[in-house]
Image (cartoon, helix red, strand yellow):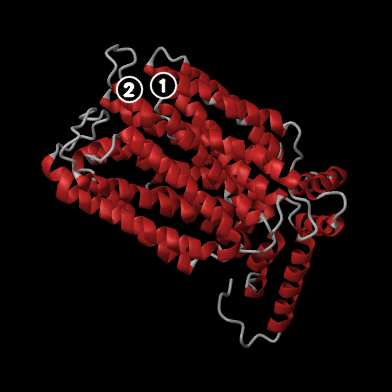
Amino acid sequence: MDNKPLLSDPEKSNYQSVGKALREAEKKYIKTLDNRRMLLAAFSAVLGNFSFGYGLVYPSPVLPVLEGYTDPVLHITDAEKSWFGSVFALGCCFGGISSMFLNDRLGRKLSIMCSAFPAAVGFLLMGSAQHISMLLLGRILTGVAGGMTSSSIPVYISEISHAGLRGALGACPQLMAVCGALVLYALGLILPWRWLAIAGEVPVLLMLFLLCFMPDSPRFLISQGKDEKALQALIWLRGPNTAYRGEFQRIKESVLKASSSLSCTELSDPYYYKPILISVFMRCLQQLSGINPILTYLEPIFNRTNVILRGGYDAALVGLVRLVSVLVAALVMDKAGRKILLYTSSSLMLVSSLSMGLYVHFTVDMSNSTNLTMVDSDPHPPVDPVNYLGIIPLVCIMLYILGYAFGWGPITWLLMSEILPLKARGTASGLCVMVSWITGFVLTEAFLPVVNVFKLETPFFFFAIISLCCIIFTYRVVPETKGRTLEQIESYFRTGRRSFIK
């Protein structure tokens, strides 16, 4: 694909005129739409991400309790700590693999609904656990559900939404995952660990109930030859008194161009391999930035760094900051654009990771042992004197979460669903989730051993290097998709004409 300016191209003005006309027509159409039912469908789907966020950070308040158990059956060993934190990512990997097949066979909506079964069984196992093995199995099953929703929900939302709200709705999966984590942190202050697992059943069952009444993606229905059902789904989503037939025809034409299954030969076409590689590398960089081990071991990290408040309260505070950040990102994403938010996000993560590494190097690891203790070393710290340096790790982590939630958290999900071509969208989204969660599993599993051998500063310096890579990757590779229809984005990768996205 030629990314050079088209100054000498005699057809440049024609492509620019076509792109501009399409954008103007889309803006007029958007103003006539009734978005209430579309928002309800999106909310029903992203409840799966609430459950995902809830399950992801479950070890944070639970590990200190299990480590303090005197009963050998439920007492967690050092080796089991890493597994308890990381097997969720391993489950997500299996969920991503299964969604590669389910997305294109059952459809996006049914794939999301299928995730309710492993999620419900997983939370039940953890709530009734009589042995550590039941907890580990429960973590794997909730991870499987998380992997299925990770690849299915962004695709479903992108295909039922229109260009005017796709950015804001595209941030909703990350927003709901953040809400799930915040609720877990908050409930962890008042509920026993078993009841935390039982509470996780509520969003799973509510999602399953609501999705029974929601339509499937019109694009998927057209790809299955169900044009009448697709039209009815679009009418339900857009409202009966809108010019929905024009959008239906555009969707149908786009689907017909990609009606056959993706072959290995076609993968050599830049139209397919470039957006797939961009999506895969974005998801890998997202995981390598350190978000999973930081969220999974958030309370233990705070206990280790002599933070000014108790670890559990700091974790809840960070969860609140993360929620506010994603809300702001959702509001400005369709105004500011994707790339500027990715630059801001990467810069904040770089500064915070580097600062955290330097703080640990010059304070904590000069005076403390290298072992990352799960239990707060002093559950009743003295009121006086107060060590005000203890606010530094809290500020660093809050700044990191702010940066991640502002860009690399929600936008990687959104861009994956926007730039993947329709023919490869179901399979490729599952591949992206599988690859990213393999990365997440390795990083989370290695975090505690690395900290115990090389001290806590080492992973944070690594995260700073990855954040720098994120800035370079955004500048060199990531396209701007703000305000563009999925058809315009596909035309950009198909033709290489930047007039479709400028």
Give whichever of discs 1 and 2 has the lower sequence position.
2
Amino acid under label 1? Trp
Residue 193: mark in rendering = 1
Near-viewer residue (88 or 327): 327
**Residue 364's spot in the image, x, y percent?**
17, 44
**Residue 124's spot in the image, x, y percent?**
52, 19
- Helix, strand or loop at disc 2? helix
Left or right side of 261 for 89: left
The local crowd at label 2, few if under 14, some if 14 to 19, many if 20 or more residues have their Cα within 10 Å, is some
Residue at the location (57% across, 50% down)?
A: 171
Left or right side of 394 for 401: right
Residue at the location (46% across, 37% down)?
A: 182
Residue 65: mark in rendering = 2
Cα separation, mark 1 vs mark 2, equals 8 Å
Near-viewer residue (309 or 281): 309
Near-viewer residue (273 or 80): 80
Q: Is residue 384 above or below residue 356?
A: above
Residue 26: mark in rendering = none
Res 142 visible? yes
Q: Are marks 1 and 2 in contact (CB under 8 Å)?
A: yes
- Quadrant for the N terminus in the image: bottom right
Near-viewer residue (86 or 380): 380
Amino acid under label 2? Val
Residue situated furthest front in the rendering:
384
Q: Is residue 358 above or below residue 190?
A: below
**Residue 301's spot in the image, x, y percent?**
29, 38
Residue 354 sits in quarter = bottom left
Q: Is residue 384 above or below residue 192?
A: below
Residue at the location (69% across, 59% down)?
A: 163
